[in-house]
């Protein structure tokens, strides 16, 4: 088996070539560093203030991923990234707009909400409430920065707790 030196640029790879003793075919093996050290470092998700995203609420357990944070990802087509403290007025507005947030839906791990609960709302539903004059107050530290693609920071700040 022929061995090669580590790549001077990458520094971590060792390449070996040889011949299989069973089939006489040639093979090539590249040996690198353990996978753990090759994983990219996860950068913290940020809020609308440019700081690390803070939790929205753990009781009820909110967030698209039900981890307490208003995180988003490819599966979150509704963009549940606005952390809001719900009001009766907004709950009624949302119900009449076709999204009843007050009724429990266990099949979706949804407890049903009351005024005063904090919840990760769909960004566009919050924006609709804002345009209708009934947007609930928000917790800026727990609103994901991607909401700024849809809603201005000024609008959010005007409704900040």
Image (spheres, helix red, strand yellow):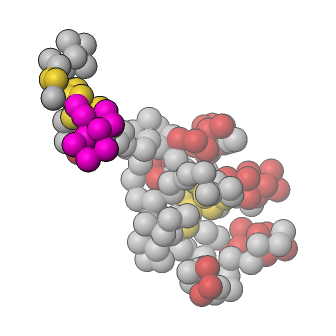
Nearer-the-camera pick, 112 or 5: 5
Nearer-the-camera pick, 26 or 94: 26
The location of residue 136, given as percent across then percent down, is: 64, 61
Nearer-the-camera pick, 140 or 74: 74
Asked whether 25 falls inside the magenta stretch, the response is yes
Residue name at image x 61 percent, y 69 percent: 86
The location of residue 110, given as percent across then percent down, is: 59, 80
Relative placement, left or right, of 112 versus 39 is right
| Depicted 133 relative to depicted 60: above or below | above
The location of residue 89, given as percent across then percent down, is: 73, 71
Q: Which residues are magenta?
A: 18-26
The location of residue 56, given as percent across then percent down, is: 46, 61
Relative placement, left or right, of 12 versus 124 is left
| Depicted 74 relative to depicted 117: above or below | above
Asked whether 31 falls inside the magenta stretch, the response is no
Prevailing secondary structure of the magenta residues:
loop
**Can I make out residue 77 in this image?**
yes
Residue name at image x 33 percent, y 37 percent: 25
* Quadrant location, the N terminus: top left
């Amino acid at each position: 088996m022929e061995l090669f030196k580590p790549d001077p640029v990458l520094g971590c790879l060792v390449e070996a070539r040889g011949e299989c003793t069973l089939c006489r075919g040639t093979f090539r093996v590249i040996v690198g560093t353990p996978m753990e050290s090759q994983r990219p470092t996860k950068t913290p998700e940020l809020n609308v203030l440019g700081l690390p995203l803070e939790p929205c609420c753990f009781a009820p357990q909110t967030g698209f991923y039900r981890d307490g944070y208003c995180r988003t990802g490819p599966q979150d087509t509704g963009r549940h990234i606005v952390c809001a403290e719900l009001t009766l007025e907004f709950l009624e507005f949302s119900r009449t707009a076709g999204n009843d947030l007050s009724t429990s839906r266990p099949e979706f791990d949804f407890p049903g909400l009351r005024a005063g609960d904090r919840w990760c709302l769909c960004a566009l539903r919050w924006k609709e409430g804002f345009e209708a004059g009934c947007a609930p107050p928000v917790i800026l530290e727990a609103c994901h920065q991607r909401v700024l693609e849809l809603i201005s920071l000024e609008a959010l700040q005007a409704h900040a707790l």
